[in-house]
Image: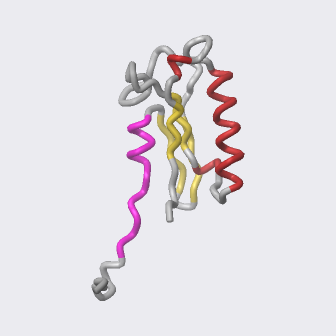
Amino acid sequence: GVKQLVVGVNKMDSTEPPYSEPRFEEIKKEVSSYIKKIGYNPAAVAFVPISGWHGDNMLEASSKMPWFKGWNVERKEGKAEGKTLIDALDAILPPSRPTDKPLRLPL
């Protein structure tokens, strides 16, 4: 199953007013309650406000959202933090591969 999540809150340029912190926090709260119901720990999920159309917070931190101080995740393997979507994707830990065990192939 899926062990790690990153939530990109897109279309922040279309909120009223544009790049609205209250709207981001509202979406974050709603999605957090949903992912908690399905068995994830919201503290282990990075929420990043982005605008794919303008590239805000995708690769570089956006000056249009000065209220966003960055995301933090807490998990068994340790803490991670960053400001952009690419930082959140880079913080995903690759699964461990059982290379010391025999190779199994389906027939």
80 in magenta = no
Instruction: From the top left corner, tell me how far across and down residue 38 is, in percent.
Output: 66, 57
- Using the image, determine if residue 66 lies above or below residue 77: above
Residue at left offset 43%, top offset 52%: 92
Residue 41 position (above or below residue 106): above
Q: Residue at the front extreme?
A: 107
Residue ID at (46%, 15%): 63
Quarter in which the C terminus is drawn: bottom left
Q: Is residue 86 magenta?
A: yes
Give whichever of 43, 28 is nearer the camera: 28
Left or right of 102, for residue 62: right
Q: Report the residue at 64% width, 48% height from top.
A: 43
Residue located 43% across and 48% down the image: 91
Q: Position of residue 93 (x, y in %)?
A: 42, 57
Please tell me in which quadrant of the rendered image residue 69 appears.
top right
Magenta residues, start to end: 85-97
Residue 8 is left or right of residue 22, and the answer is: left
Position in image of residue 94 (x %, y %): 38, 60
Extreme-top residue of the structure: 17
Render colour scheme: secondary structure
Question: Is 61 above or below relative to 84?
Answer: above
Residue 83 position in % (x across, y down) = 47, 32
